[in-house]
């Protein structure tokens, strides 16, 4: 009888260890965010100005908004096509897991000195929510929130 309990106990331990070892590992933020993103919805302050597929969009031009973050061999490059259709290129990096910083943007977007910072308030494999940390001169000095999707 003791052998049965010992065998049962060992079997349960093995199953438990096997199940614990098979957990899916979550990739770091730097890998999960390095994609091409397009606007799903955009807020200027508290006002929703764009929703993909919406018929009453205040800023329909956000349909062309693109944020492409790449990480090739440790070189992190960004291409940003803004609401006005202008494209800016430069570098990107993370500060912790909650702040995205675009630097060396060329040409420098109006009033930025070539640097734009965002708080990352949500991230999964197909969606990221970014809030700009400084007001945007292009949108009347509002703090903008971008919900972006891939693809």
Image (cartoon, helix red, strand yellow):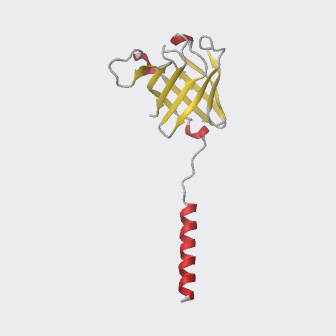
Q: Residue furthest bottom?
A: 1
Residue closest to the eye, 142 or 40: 142
Q: Quadrant of residue 88?
A: top right
Q: Check the picture and name the quadrant holding the C terminus.
A: top left
Name the spot of residue 92 as percent of width and height, x first.
Answer: 63, 28
Q: Position of residue 66 (x, y in %)?
A: 49, 24
Look at 42% across and 15% down and name the residue there. 59
Residue 42 lies, with reference to residue 113, above or below; the image says below
- What is the quadrant of residue 132 in the picture? top right
Above or below, 39 against 85 in this view is below
Query: At 53% from the left edge and 37% from the top edge, which residue is drawn?
Result: 123
Which image quadrant is residue 102 in?
Answer: top right
* Rendered location of residue 106, percent (x, y): 62, 17
122, above or below 27, in the image = above
Residue 76, given in percent of the width and then of the height, sits at: 63, 31
**Is 26 situated left or right of 147 in this image?**
right
- The mark total stands at 0
For image coordinates 37% across by 17% down, the residue present is 57
Q: Residue furthest left?
A: 55
């Amino acid at each position: 009888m003791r052998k049965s309990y010992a065998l049962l106990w060992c079997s349960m331990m093995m199953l438990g260890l096997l199940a614990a070892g098979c957990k899916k590992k979550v990739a770091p933020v730097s890998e999960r965010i390095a994609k091409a993103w397009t606007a799903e919805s955009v807020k200027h302050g508290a006002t929703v100005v764009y929703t993909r597929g919406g018929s009453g969009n205040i800023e329909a031009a956000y349909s062309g908004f693109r944020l492409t973050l790449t990480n090739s061999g440790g070189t992190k490059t960004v291409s940003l096509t803004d609401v006005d259709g202008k494209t800016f290129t430069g570098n990107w990096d993370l500060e912790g897991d909650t702040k995205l910083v675009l630097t060396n943007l060329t040409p420098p977007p109006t009033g930025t000195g070539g640097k734009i910072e965002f708080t990352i308030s949500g991230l999964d494999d197909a969606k990221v929510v970014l809030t700009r940390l400084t007001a945007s001169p292009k949108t009347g000095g509002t703090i903008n929130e971008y919900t972006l999707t891939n693809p």
